[in-house]
Image (cartoon, rainbow, N blue to C red):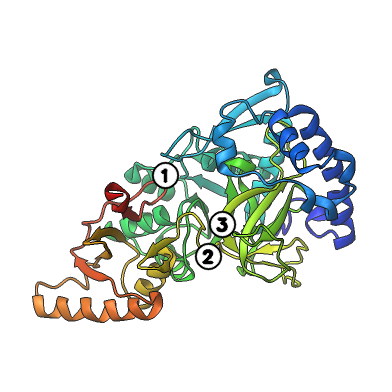
Amino acid sequence: MQRYYQPDIETASREEIVKIQNEKIVKQVRHVYDNVEYYRNLMDKKGVKPEDIKGIEDIHKLPFLKKDDLRECYPYGLLATDLKNCVRIQSTSGTTGKRVVAFYTQHDVDLWEECCARAIVAAGGSDEDVVQVAYGYGLFTGGAGLHGGAHKVGAMTLPMSSGNTERQIQFMMDLQSTILCCTPSYAAFIAESLKDRGYKPEDNKLKAGIFGAEPWTEEMRQAIEEGLGIKAYDIYGLTETSGPGVAFECSEQKGMHINEDHFYAEIIDPDTGEVLPEGEKGELVFTALDKEAFPLLRYRTRDICILTRGKCSCGRTHVKMCKPMGRSDDMLIIRGVNVFPSQIETVLLNEGYTPNYMIYVDRKNNTDTLDIDVELSVDQFSDNIADLQEREKKLAAAMRTMLGIGPKIHLVPPKTIQRSEGKAVRVVDNRKLHD
């Protein structure tokens, strides 16, 4: 079985990787300084010139970019090449403010698809496979990235897009899909839908799934693996850095290898901007080392995680990032306590509940309230009020242990929480309506 898509670079020595990064960062900083007025002004303000960057060890001298900068520069302010050289745009799925629009030359598209091809091969994919891409197509990067990656590998590609679950299942069974690519919440929904139609996990031909675009826990991974009879692999990316494929899981399933020949990663203190040593938890920062059209330098992702360089059993040598532990901008502060939705999901799955839930935050009489609707499975459902109340009380106690505050739990009947066919929306924060 093919283990690597590009073995020479995926198993390169640390010295070889640093040499590539040194060459690329010097060239990239000059490219950005000469072609992007906005970033040139940021560098000038900080007193940094391209000649001050002699290698990757100097990257800390460069200014950061934030999402606010991208919105301010919409649409063309960070474009680093003539528009005639661009062959595509992709855009974020964000609903607030101006969208982030990313531009791609053909070279950028090719590199992105190669990164996704590495992810597919790491999940056991080859030209023998049938890859069902159930990420959204269009402006969202998920569908386009994995579709292109599957083509590079030579796999039969089903460009399903998200939604229309009936058709997803029909094609999955009839065309014997072997790899499923979609959001983890949609994978869980497909598993649930297959079960509802009387299928067992062994009835499908799936062997692997490549799931990303939203946070998911180890407990949810286990539930998906059991529900579909597969190995579930994580994939990471941002529209701002190209899309999925910036980092991906291998057979070890303990962190995602970052494609270090294309993306340089740092971990910083989100409050001070100070670069933290390896193994410390902080905010992930990425620099695109060889993108032509939209080359972001030191972009703050807002994702909280840890980088590690331990030896990996798969043979890949690139640094690993753990699953994002939440985002510094979607962390909920409730009565002074930091709460991440992923913590709530962990408790639910540990206590034997489904990963279908909604979080409602409000403010009443100047005090924050936290309500969580938790959907029961068909097996768990009961019309015994006393029994439900007892279970709500027990679950609230488990939540208090994890979160440090006690939420109000509402156990709701099966199939009453709306399913997501794209990115799942789990939090409704009504407090801003009263500010």
Disc 3 marks a residue whose amino acid type is: Asp
Residue 117 appears anywhere in the view: yes
Residue carrying label 1: 171
Secondary structure type for disc 2: loop
Q: Position of residue 182 (x, y in %)?
A: 47, 50
Residue carrying label 2: 325
Residue 198 appears anywhere in the view: no
- The quadrant the N terminus occupies is bottom right
Secondary structure type for disc 3: strand
Q: Nearer the viewer, mark 1 or mark 2?
A: 2
Q: Residues within 10 Å of mark 1 (few under 14, many from 20)?
A: some
Residue at 84 percent across and 55 percent down: it is 57
Disc 1 marks a residue whose amino acid type is: Phe
As drawn, 423 above or below 204: above
Q: Is 273 or 91 nearer to us in this picture?
A: 273
Label 1, label 2: how far apart the Cα atoms are: 34 Å
Between disc 3 and disc 2, whose residue precedes? 3
Disc 2 marks a residue whose amino acid type is: Met
Q: Nearer the viewer, mark 3 or mark 1?
A: 3
Q: Position of residue 78 (x, y in %)?
A: 66, 31
Residue carrying label 3: 303
Decide if residue 378 is on the left or right side of residue 53. left
Q: Residue furthest top?
A: 84
Q: Position of residue 54 (x, y in %)?
A: 90, 47
Label 3, label 1: how far apart the Cα atoms are: 35 Å
Q: Quadrant of residue 290?
A: top right
Q: Is 208 or 270 nearer to us in this picture?
A: 270
Decide if residue 355 is on the left or right side of residue 221. left
Between disc 1 and disc 2, whose residue precedes? 1
